[in-house]
Image: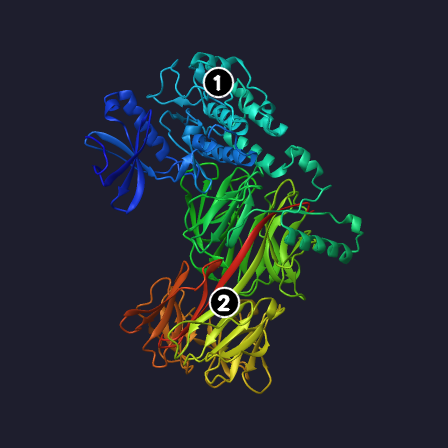
Amino acid sequence: MAVSPGSKLGPYEIVALLGVGGMGEVYRARDSRLGRDVAIKVLPASLSADPERVRRFQQEARAVGALSHPNILSVHDVGESDGVAYLVTELLDGSTLRDRMGGTALPKRKAVEYAVQTAQGLAAAHAAGIVHRDLKPENLFVTRDGRIKILDFGLAKLTTGPSLETTDTVGVTEAAGTTPGTVLGTIGYLSPEQVRGEASDHRSDIFSLGAILYEMLTGRRAFRGPTKVETMTAILRHEPEDMEASGRDIDPALERIVRRCLEKSPDERFQSARDLAFQLTELSSGSESGVSAATFRRHRRSRRRVLAPALAAALTLGALAVGFALGTRQRDVVETDYRQLTFRRGTITAARFSPDGGTVVYSAIWDGEAPDVYTTSPGNPESRPLGLGGAGLLAISAQGELAVSLRMGPVVNSFEREGTLASLPLATSTAPREIHENIRWADWARNGTDLAVVAADPKGTRLEYPVGTTLLTTPSWISHPRVSPDGRTVAFLEHPQVGDDRGFVAVVDRDGNYRRIGGVWSTLWGLAWRPDGEEIWFTGGPEAALAVRRLYAMTLDGRQRLLAISPGELTLHDVSVSGETLLSVEDRRRNVVGLPPGATEERDFTWLDRTIPDDLSADGEVLLFHEGGKAGAVVGSIYTRKLDGSPAVRLAEGYGVELSPDRKWALSFVPRVPGEWRLVPTGAGSPRAVELRGFDPATVRALHVLSDGRRLVVRGERDGKPLRSWVYDVDSGTCEPLGPDGAVSRVMSPDGRHLVMIDPEGRFWVVPTDGGTAREILGIEPGDEPIALSDDTSAVITTRRGGFEAQVVRVDPNRGAREIVHTLRPPNRAGLVGINIVLATPDGRHYVYGYTQQLSELYLAQGIR
């Protein structure tokens, strides 16, 4: 079959010839099934009769198809049509490195950046047992956004046995391997062992990359003679010319790295591409004026390099303030360098140092895209996605094993997401191995085997360490578990109130001994151990201060010290063994939009910086909300607002919960420890304290005000009895159980006569508040959250949140019929974390919803101690 424009190979229509190489022809084609353009490499008819050529072509398909890395050409498909073998790959836009160089040297920064990317791609291939063996500028492609793609694994050697990143032995060539004594590859970039026709391993690729880096830096080939024989002789016997002879100013440390790559003996080279990438990254991040990384580390405290002027200045002033506050002398204040690592608009959910410290791994939601895990390094403004799609980073072990959360669900309790815990090595392209479902947090012990995990529990939250061994079950919610360096203790942040990040720093050991350290904090988010295990570092705000997080250190006996402050909110992510710190600065907002009566388009009802909707009146005209950020001060501020455009009215301090059926009262909670429940008048009058006698206050979650104004529906544990909902008389303190055993309330009808409740088996019920017969609800599906109930109980309104949108669904509880009434999508997706709360009228026509936006910038801090 002749391949030409217009012909078809399977479902692919050939568009144009892109190029011809020694191992095949490459065409632009159109995938008719997915409607996308692809590249197709075919083996020419003149070569298809050669079994060795066919074998190498199929070998390339197997080799590249086994890999998935941002610096390696992605393979979509492989097939055969009418005797023509073809390989389908992504279609790249850009040029080869050979074309990019154009016979001249590249700027040092670009050369090092391209070498780092190439080394990272090689590390993934080597870890999968694949050696390229024909690395050269023609086989490195530079996309328009500056990403390197390694091409043409046609001469790749597949090995079996241990990972090439962890062994120096030569892998065993497969049965279809090259005959010993055969020279494969391109003259000028071959390693000495390839020139001699000897067995070669992954260190041959490191030699070839060294030759390429030499050429990028000097504009000259490292080994070149008038003839091929003389070129091979130079590779075997001669050293490349000194790089300074090119007339360019080459860092001595960089030249040493190149020379080590080009050692004649494989044992004298870098023993892994990962080590090479680390050394280059360290050099580029630690030296910008011709000094080595080691020299930079020795002198970094003696000279200040301001890379993020506004933040650095603010934090330096903060450090001075710390000195005065703690009674220290100004000369004791340590200057701190901050290097910005991320530059896109969005929110960072987690960040960790790689074991060697040269790479930063983080997860983020950029520009409204799906969450993903990325890698970056100091000095590199770009990040590389791992392509896990919808995943978040949880932890990384000392051995380079990632713990990630796959298929993350919507935000729960305003802060967390649940997903499936999985692991995969950072340096390889293997698929994640799933471990545990419905996990919110996880951290590795230093042994790289044991995991600490946090999961939802019927009693609140469960902490397991290792997986399967429960150390603690608490009605509070737990965040940021971190295993101590000795593996004996798990430190974490404990938050008593759902939807509120105030709380305590706490620890629990392997024997289940649990204790809180220090007092309560108004906001807590971010924790790590100091590498020696002597202190826990965390970001939080003092209880008596505004809700602005600062960086603190605290010993296990409660002695604390302030490390850094910022005008924005700091979040601590990690502390490296060398004492460097990963911090993000957050600009977090909570917004509210809705569709009120008489409106045909959504309107914005955001009031201050963190507007959180609490309840919507049955007619859709009045919103109860609270401000929970800096504008809400320490414990928040409660407001009501008519949705006709009227301004908001502040009622009291605290968090809003629910309007009474007659709208005369707002049930509120003041999130101190212990918390205080109150009835606040929406008009004239004084607040009334609500004393919940007999209840365990740590278990109380949802309250509803009944129509008589003196009785409440309380969800909690009472007198040692299991969790359920009760009707509680505020005046007399009498209490009666409500609904099926173990059932808890979710939402109440506007007249206060009926509740939607859920039992321990997950079934939903309509329950009369006067104690009548409960009726099971039909049509509610897993993932539905009831948010409204009509007075006649003929309609239950539910919401289903997922990704960056939510649905409002009307359910007939008697017949099970479902109708999607609205699909909600926030108007601005930049920095969108997710939709937190949806409220609707009982007919589902009108609604408001709250969503969180968080813009984060990640920084590497050097000098905090």
Q: Residue at x 57, y 68 (%)?
A: 628
Q: Which residue is mark 2?
A: 591
Image coords of residue 69 (percent x, y)? 42, 38
Looking at the image, residue 323 lies above or below residue 699 = above
The secondary structure type at the circle numbered 1 is loop
Q: Residue at x 37, y 29 (%)?
A: 153
Q: Which residue is mark 1?
A: 224
Three-letter amino acid code of the residue under disc 1:
Arg
Image coords of residue 316 (percent x, y)? 70, 52
Q: Are marks 1 and 2 in contact (CB under 8 Å)?
A: no
User: Furthest residue to the bottom?
Assistant: 684
Three-letter amino acid code of the residue under disc 2:
Asn
Image coords of residue 180 (percent x, y)? 38, 14
Looking at the image, residue 418 lies above or below residue 608 = above
Q: Nearer the viewer, residue 102 or 15?
A: 102
Q: Nearer the viewer, residue 179 or 42?
A: 42
Other residues around mark 2 within 10 Å, as few (<14) / some (14–19) / many (≥20) = many
